Amino acid sequence: MMEKPSADCTAYEIAENLKEIKDSMAEACIKAGRGPEDVMLLGVTKTVSPQRINAAIAAGLRSIGENRVQELLGKKDELTLAGVDVHLIGHLQTNKVSKIVGQVNMIESIDSFRLASAVNQASKKAGIVTDVLVQVNIGREQAKSGVMEENLEALLAEMGTLGSIKVRGLMTIPPIFDTEREKRAVFARMYKLFIDIRGKKIDNVTIGTMPMDVLSMGMSGDYKEAILEGATIIRIGSALFGKR
Ligand SMILES: *Cc1c(COP(=O)(O)O)cnc(C)c1O
């Protein structure tokens, strides 16, 4: 797929891109023996204008993800969000937590107990339960946020004491790889971690009989591989809206 500069990406092109992505998703789902409804397409809207986000929603996009609290809150009033899920996917500072809780359907970027506690406290105050994902730094990269895999279980166990958040699953931003084999290998490792941790039945992670069921991984350059390896949310920015 050709990437075009954002400014040139018209409503028509956004609709075409969305259709192409959905077709590729369906193809990857068939290849993986999964149903098309098993994977959610989250349109990543950082730096994208409200007009262009609304064009994607009009074309059928049902979930969006923003990185920054300020940017999201600044654009939100101009978005036609009826029936659209909004996720926060970027690094969250504890001093921004009270602003974002209640404004999104899910926070995908929890990576410390301190942050989880802050979200819990703000949710309690608002009288809501916030769905969250724990972000894992699967590639052990210095510049990236996320908990290291060896610390995941302890963090989840600690988070199990927090009654106003619900851990729905895991999120990761793996290193960028060139080959399909490397892309699949890192997603497969993440999926294995997801399955292993689900098997542990940690409080507040296993919800009644429903275990945590969300695995958010895969972006414009590697979403097909992510679907083949078990992603339930893919986060797509440039393939949908054009180059940032
Ligand atoms: C920007 C971003 C994406 C989307 O990246 P693309 O390569 O443009 O699809 C996905 N997830 C996160 C956390 C991001 O910051």
Image: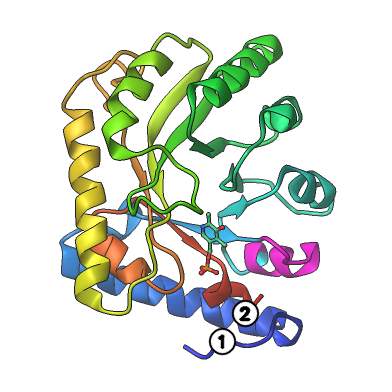
* Residue 230 place in picture, x, y as percent: 24, 54
Q: Is residue 8 magenta?
A: no
* Residue 46 place in picture, x, y as percent: 68, 60
Residue identifier under label 2 = 242
- Sequence-wise, the earlier of marks 2 and 1 is 1
Q: What's the magenta bit mostly, secondary-structure-wise?
A: helix
Q: CA distance from mark 2 to mark 1?
A: 5 Å
Q: Is the C terminus in the top left, top right, bottom left or bottom right quadrant?
A: bottom right
Is residue 160 shown above or below 57?
Answer: above
| Residue nearer the viewer, 66 or 33 | 66
Q: Amino acid at mark 1?
A: Glu
* Residue 152 place in picture, x, y as percent: 32, 30
Is residue 169 shown above or below 240?
Answer: above
Left or right of 104? Residue 147 is left
Q: Secondary structure at mark 1?
A: loop
Question: What colouring does the structure picture have?
Answer: rainbow
Taking the spot 63% from the left edge, 88% from the top edge, the residue there is 4
Taking the spot 56% from the left edge, 67% from the top edge, the residue there is 237
The region drawn magenta spans: 46-57
Residue 185 occupies which quadrant of the picture? bottom left
Is residue 97 shown above or below 15?
Answer: above
Q: Which mark is residue 165?
A: none
Residue identifier under label 1 = 3
Taking the spot 29% from the left edge, 38% from the top edge, the residue there is 149
Q: Is residue 52 magenta?
A: yes
Mark 2 touches mark 1? (CB < 8 Å): yes
* Residue 166 place in picture, x, y as percent: 45, 22
Left or right of 149? Residue 158 is right
